[in-house]
Image (tube, rainbow, N blue to C red):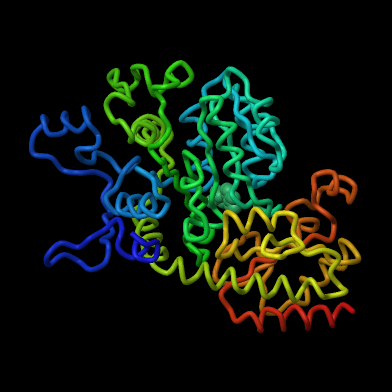
Amino acid sequence: MNVNTACIHAGYEAANGEPRCLPIYLSTTFHYDKCADVADIFDDPTLGMIYSRFENPTCDATERKIAALEGGAAAMLTSSGQAANLLAVLNLCSAGDHLVSSAAIYGGTVNLLSFTLKRFGIDCTFVSPRASKEEIAAAIRPNTKLVFGETVANPALAVLDIETFAAAAHEAGIPLVMDNTFPTPVMCRPIEWGCDIVTHSTTKYIDGHAMTGGGVIVDSGNFDWTAHADRFPGLTEPDESYHGVVYTEAYGKLAYIVKARMQLMRDLGCYPPATNGFILNQTIETLPLRMRQHCDNAQRVAEWLEGRPEVEKVDFPGLTSSPDHDLAEKYLPDGVCGVISIIVAGGRERAAALLDHLKLASIEVHVADSQTCVLHPASTTHRQLTDEQLVACGIEPGLVRLSCGLEGADDIIADLEQAFSAIA
Ligand SMILES: *Cc1c(COP(=O)(O)O)cnc(C)c1O
């Protein structure tokens, strides 16, 4: 199915006389006539639903839609992007295990991998997003269970060389897990380039209207766990918490997602409500239209910003001046995303003053929705750091993250122009 068609039709199909729109099944649980019926589902959870802590018919339809969009075998929604990345990792790593990650990833994920998972005995080694296959291979150990990266990093906007990361992972017999939040499956489908498991913060473009927080994990179904059975006993040996099931034997290509749902989601319970599943199913209908507009706006705004004397540097992989332009052309030929990062000349105070004078663009700790928004890390999310500390973690004091919304590009540019004049 073409991606535009899948955004409309995948997941839910109304049978004769049924509702045109995906119904919201607000029901914590599901009725059965006989004990034996419930027993059958406990034996094989793919036969029916039991409890909305880990499954729900509305969310199920949205999961099918997102799996179709990414070209995966199955998907599972989560209550946030953080929960998606947490469960994607925990589904493969236990205490004593290790993962390798690109260093250019979302700050929340850096914290998760560097600090919180470390307290649970899971270690992470970070490598440059530009690392060679040999450099990635050198970071992989006997207890390494996955390689992680972001297609387009938030906020660094580094584009990952997916084929290089996939080759390094596969040669070591481990999967590549990628957070595809910024491009969405409309601009890039990492599975087509060799990625095995895709995650998203659906809070960003997939919702796209700043309404619901959420996440999703999509499994390609391509990774052969049994060929590396020693590394992945959680998938290839009996699960004593689930009547001794061997996920790979019982569920084949669905093994990873069934384990994530029936073991981790069952125990951790970070599943979204049906209303959120409904909203995402609806917002995805316009995702291709919205992504094209976000990308076109960002391209025009980035090109305009590049000529401005008030701006020291514009970072956007769609610009030919970007060091990631070659990778963007390869993996994201139709556009990257709507987020641009700029360094305002004059540092911390000038950047804050620019934001104070913007009228259309609003100051928000958010990105990737229909309204243009801006964030100045040095005066908000990273305000506790000195200028020297900021530079050390890759954030210039004058750095501004600009998320181009769906307004007319001329209006976004006019807003920036009047704000530049005001601080001149
Ligand atoms: C926002 C974000 C997350 C975290 O998602 P939440 O929905 O805020 O929990 C993870 N990865 C990326 C790339 C993000 O932009």
In the rendered image, which quarter contains the C terminus? bottom right
Q: Is residue 150 above or below residue 6?
A: above
Q: Is residue 240 visible?
A: no
Side (left or right) of 254 relative to 404: left
In-front residue for pair 309/191: 191
Q: Residue at 31% across / 21% down in the picture?
A: 246
In the rendered image, which quarter contains the N terminus? bottom left
Residue 209 image position (x, y, % from top left): 50, 67
Quadrant of res 220: top left
Residue 126 image position (x, y, % from top left): 69, 34
Q: Is residue 388 above or below residue 341?
A: above
Q: Is residue 174 above or below residue 211?
A: above
Residue 346 image position (x, y, % from top left): 91, 66
In-front residue for pair 385/345: 345
In-front residue for pair 11/72: 72
Residue 40 image position (x, y, % from top left): 16, 30
Q: Residue at 88% across / 65% down in the picture?
A: 349
Quadrant of res 414: bottom right
Side (left or right) of 217 relative to 367: left
Q: Is residue 414 visible?
A: yes
Side (left or right) of 392 relative to 24: right
